Amino acid sequence: MLFSGLEHFRHASVLTVHAGSKGVPAPHAMVIASGLLIIIGGLSILLGLRPTWGVWCVTLFLVPTSLVIHNFWADTNLAVKEANFTDFKKNVGLLGAAWMSLSIPQPWPFSLEW
């Protein structure tokens, strides 16, 4: 997640164009906000620092991204449809993993929160 968040800043112009083509309102602001969400969420989970908040940040990124950006059901180009379907499934898996992390009793053994 951290790497993806950093990539939102490195490639903000390309991601802004793509988000705009998908009908995302204020695409540049949303690219920056979504990058911040996954960096904060990823760090929170990685460090065990308020991991519940981190899971919510990751969820707030993954659900809209999966439904709006990776809406494979609307694609007519087969190659694009396959790529979006793969990314959609990846996001669902990441969402499941994030939520499963909440089943670990807190504070986590190596967390910064005690």
Image (tube, rainbow, N blue to C red):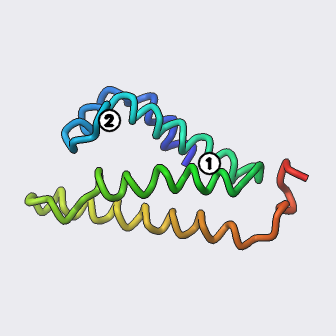
Q: Pointers 1 and 2 in contact (CB under 8 A)?
A: no
Q: Is residue 114 above or below residue 16?
A: below
Q: Residues within 10 Å of mark 2 (few under 14, many from 20)?
A: some
**Horizontal and vertical percent position of residue 103:** 71, 73
| Residue bearing mark 2 | 15
Q: Residues within 10 Å of mark 1 (few under 14, many from 20)?
A: many
User: Which amino acid type corresponds to the residue marked 2 in the rendered image?
Assistant: Leu
**Horizontal and vertical percent position of residue 53:** 66, 51
| Residue bearing mark 1 | 42
Q: Nearer the viewer, residue 40 or 7?
A: 40
**Horizontal and vertical percent position of residue 101:** 67, 67
User: Which of the marked residues, 1 or 2, is nearer the chain's N terminus?
Assistant: 2
How far apart marks 1 and 2 lie (CA) works out to 20 Å
Residue 99's quadrant in the figure?
Answer: bottom right
Question: At 57% across and 67% down in the image, what residue appears?
Answer: 97
Residue 85 is left or right of residue 107, and the answer is: left
Q: What is the number of the mark on residue 114?
A: none
Residue 111 is left or right of residue 25, and the answer is: right
Q: Secondary structure at mark 2?
A: helix
Residue 71 is left or right of residue 42, and the answer is: left
Residue 40's quadrant in the figure?
Answer: top right
Q: Is residue 85 above or below residue 62?
A: below
User: Which amino acid type corresponds to the residue marked 1 in the rendered image?
Assistant: Gly
**Horizontal and vertical percent position of residue 105:** 81, 70
Question: At 47% across and 49% down in the image, what residue appears?
Answer: 61
Q: Secondary structure at mark 1?
A: helix
